[in-house]
Amino acid sequence: MANRETIIILDYGSQYTQLIARRVRELGVYTEILPWNAPVERIAALSPLGLILSGGPNSVYDEGAPTLSAAVTALGLPVLGICYGMHLLAHTLGGQVAPGVRREYGPAEVDIAAPASLFAGLDARQSVWMSHGDQVAALPPGFHALATSTDGILAAMGDPERRLYAVQFHPEVQHTPNGAALLRNFLYGVCGCRGDWTPGAFITETVARIRAQVGAGQVICGLSGGVDSAVVAALVHRAIGDQLTCIFVDTGLLRRDEGQQVAATFHEALGMKLVSVDASARFLGALSGVTDPEQKRRIIGEQFIRVFEEEARRVGDARFLAQGTIYPDVIESAGTATAHKIKSHHNVGGLPEDMHLALVEPLRDLFKDEVRQVGLELGLPEQLVWRHPFPGPGLAVRILGEITPERVATLQAADAIFLEELWAAGQYRQTAQAFVVLLPVRSVGVMGDGRTYANVAALRAVVTSDFMTADWAHLPYDLLGRVANRIVNEVRGVNRVVYDVSSKPPATIEWE
């Protein structure tokens, strides 16, 4: 939809920028994240209904600190500044920002002085989440204090005539219970949004965009069996029908029985053209002796593309490759100007520069939960839509250290036991992602009155809604005990099982 209502988030380096975007979309409004120094022409071209200025780690007085262009404020759009965004509005528009005498980090209470606009319908005292050192010491001309913390620090300010607002706290995090209501007030009450961002609207728009990009060309889709590539296949198939050929590549790094499950779902149940390619020897050979995770991803990314290019020539000289890149992949592969590179995803940072296929990436701007909603709207089986994510590089990033056929077989057996027990205990849908990691260490054990020196397997299970942040799943002890007992007894070469209780951040969900 060319006239889709849009909110622009200017990213000043906050760890919560993507979370702001998710919250806005959950409220039915499409949003795009742009770097803080995006040209004003680029912003204006999107015809946004409003702007949100994210938080960030800087002080407005730091040398080289990100700024707010006068050309942006001259657009006359509604603005909501969050944390550093509040300081920036005050500093830019004639107020004063100063180092806080008392810093506020964590939960706080704020008292609402002006219950209209941002705080319409909310109680006079609100629990919020603070994270700041600087504070607004003097309001810019035209602004009024809307809320103060119990420590007496300005917590919100606004200029209703110019539709400019700012808050010192973070409404996007769950620790601000009524943050969604505040954002809703800004989107609908201040910006005048209607809320046209729905899975159905996305499908309609995306189908039209795919048709325009592809025309009469042939498309191949790299199908892994995971939800992302499945939704891409369904979207492209709806757009161009038999112009699409799905290609399932057996890399030798898949979960147990993966190939049969993919064939049953996509060819037999959904009627898509599916070609299965056994490239296990090729992938395992290329990975022989490799231990660095970034090198693994680059090798796998290149091998995938080479297989796809070869298969493309066999299906009518296809010129397009559809793949399931989603927004967290882009962010972690340093897809924004202010993001640090966490790891290269095989389908983003791992692609070879000389590839001959044009990419079709309809999910590139979606979060995982949005992908699932689109999948259900497309009519994909619920069991497939809610399947746990499986990384494109497969078990290669769950085998730390060298990859060998023997280590792959060990991990496949252990992983199958873990997932089987999760299903039996009714815990599979309660976790967002669960898997086993084979560690590059061995430990001493005792089995059958004899000494063993064998592999260590780590169980990993997390709960999350967006995969940008995650917490470890508090699985029942008896379940963990059953899994560990079965792995040690049934998987040759493993004598110790540990459970990963790290959150993201500081850890990532996958170990590599």
Image: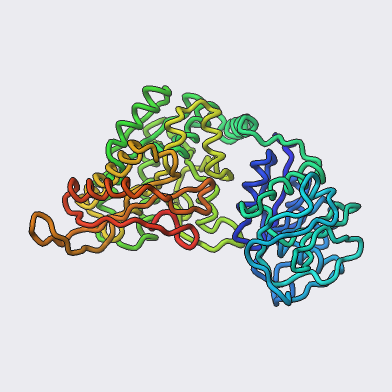
Residue positioned 25% across, 52% down in the render = 285
Residue 383 appears in which quarter of the rendering? Answer: top left
Looking at the picture, tell me which residue is in the foreground, 65 or 166. 166
Seen in the picture, residue 319 relative to 238 is either above or below; the reply is: below
Is 414 on the left or on the right of 19, as rendered? left
- Indicate the position of residue 262 as horizontal and vertical percent values: 35, 32
Residue 507 in sight here: yes
Is 314 on the left or on the right of 191, as rendered? left
Residue positioned 47% across, 55% down in the render = 349
Residue 105 appears in which quarter of the rendering? Answer: bottom right
Q: Residue furthest left?
A: 449
Looking at the picture, tell me which residue is in the foreground, 503 or 56. 503
Is 225 on the left or on the right of 43, as rendered? left
Seen in the picture, residue 133 relative to 18 is either above or below; the reply is: below
Is 208 on the left or on the right of 264, as rendered? right
Looking at the picture, tell me which residue is in the foreground, 396 or 249. 396
Residue positioned 35% across, 41% down in the render = 422
- Indicate the position of residue 230 as horizontal and vertical percent values: 45, 34
- Indicate the position of residue 222 as horizontal and vertical percent values: 42, 39
Placement of the C terminus among the 4 image quadrants: bottom left
Residue 212 in sight here: no
- Indicate the position of residue 12 as horizontal and vertical percent values: 67, 62
Placement of the N terminus among the 4 image quadrants: top right
Numbered label tally = 0
Q: How is the image coloured?
A: rainbow
